[in-house]
Amino acid sequence: MKSKIILFKLSLYPIIFILALLKIFFSTTFSYAESFDIKNVEISKQFNMNFQRTDALDEGFKIAYNNLILNITKSKDHFKLKDLSLIDIKTMIDNFSIKEEKFIDNIYYVNLDVSFNKKKIFSFLEKKNIFPSQPKKKKILFIPVVIEEEKKNIILFSENKFYQNWLVNNDNQNQLIYLLPTDDLDDIQIIKSKYEYLEDYDFKEIVNKYFLDDYIISLIYKNSSDLRVLSKIKLSDKIVLDNKVFKNFTDKNVPNIIEELKLLYEDYWKRENQINTSIKLPLTIAIDILNEKKIEDFEQTIKKFNLVSSFHVFKLDKINIYYKVIFNGTPQAFIVEMKRSGYDLDIKNKIWVLK
């Protein structure tokens, strides 16, 4: 008799679990990837008769939006997006929080965190035919080498104006984090000894000392009037060469040239992480319906995928719970993302079964 009761309880468990999942299914049909969070937006306003707290907050929303655009779009697209109305900006904000608020000497200070709805941002950019990039910070080694062609001289490290000024006015919205090499006499000798074939030199002797996989080598050729910058850019498995000429160069132009080069390098990195939102790949994922932990972990993981536009439960049976996932990329890219998160998949009759 006892064993029969146990069997009865076990047979009821899947039914109860399915009913619980059905409740989830009907109450929360769609779930979307996490928001874009812009943190530490600082605003200050004069406190006078016309002061309105909402004006300061509205200014903060505009700053947060502009910072987001700098984070996720290439430089050529910035001008298309910069004059968006406050009303339109607010429609894409999920929530905000005030981290600090104070009055000092008739000045109002506020520090905000603002969260933008990722799906709305993607939809807004897609309508403008702009593909966003996944915001990913990356630490790289940067080596600027100035070559004075007429003097056949190389200027390195602390004697080099590009080296001296590269980290000045560093923008927090930049995704690339630069590490500059130290004044190492051996490195200086190595580089100077390669003068005749610097463009073919791979710099590995120097790069390997810093234990970084990625780097940018800027060979800056200087003559009496112009500057030519040949950049060796390694931000992934391949090395890309970029050649840029700056006419009528003087030392006063160094800060402006640095800003142009930083934008150039940011754009290369953003292209590596670009999301083609026009690709909407539907995937069917099946998970063992009795494995509650696996289901919960999967949902938490998939929310963090920038390339996932949306997902929802669309079917249940006695064996599996089935999700429909809309992915902005190729099937292979989805497999790679899943493997990075510790998941393996079997494909059976166009259904991806989570192991």
Image: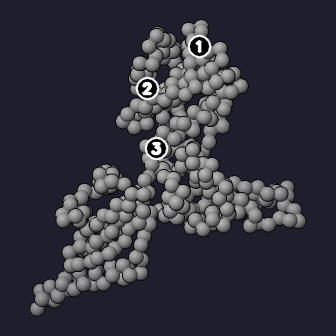
Q: CA distance from mark 3 to mark 2?
A: 24 Å
- Secondary structure category for the residue under label 2: helix
Q: Quadrant of residue 295?
A: bottom left
Q: Is residue 89 visible?
A: yes
Q: Amino acid at mark 1?
A: Glu
Q: Give the mark, 3 or 2, whose residue is nearer the N terminus.
A: 2
Q: Are marks 2 and 1 in contact (CB under 8 Å)?
A: no
- The residue drawn where x is 23% and y is 81% is 14
The 10 Å Cα crowd at callout 2, few under 14, some 14 to 19, many 20 or more, is many
Give how far across and how far down residue 333 sits, in percent. Answer: 33, 51
Q: Amino acid at mark 3?
A: Arg
**Would you say 90 lies left or right of 30 here?**
right
Q: Which residue is mark 2?
A: 207
Q: CA distance from mark 1 to mark 3?
A: 32 Å
- The residue drawn where x is 33% and y is 79% is 21
Q: Which residue is mark 3?
A: 271
Q: Quadrant of the C terminus?
A: bottom left
The 10 Å Cα crowd at callout 1, few under 14, some 14 to 19, many 20 or more, is some
The residue most toward the right is 49
Q: Quadrant of residue 161?
A: top right
Q: Which residue is mark 1?
A: 148
- Secondary structure category for the residue under label 1: strand
Q: Which mark is residue 170?
A: none
Please, is residue 226 above or below residue 82 in the view?
A: above
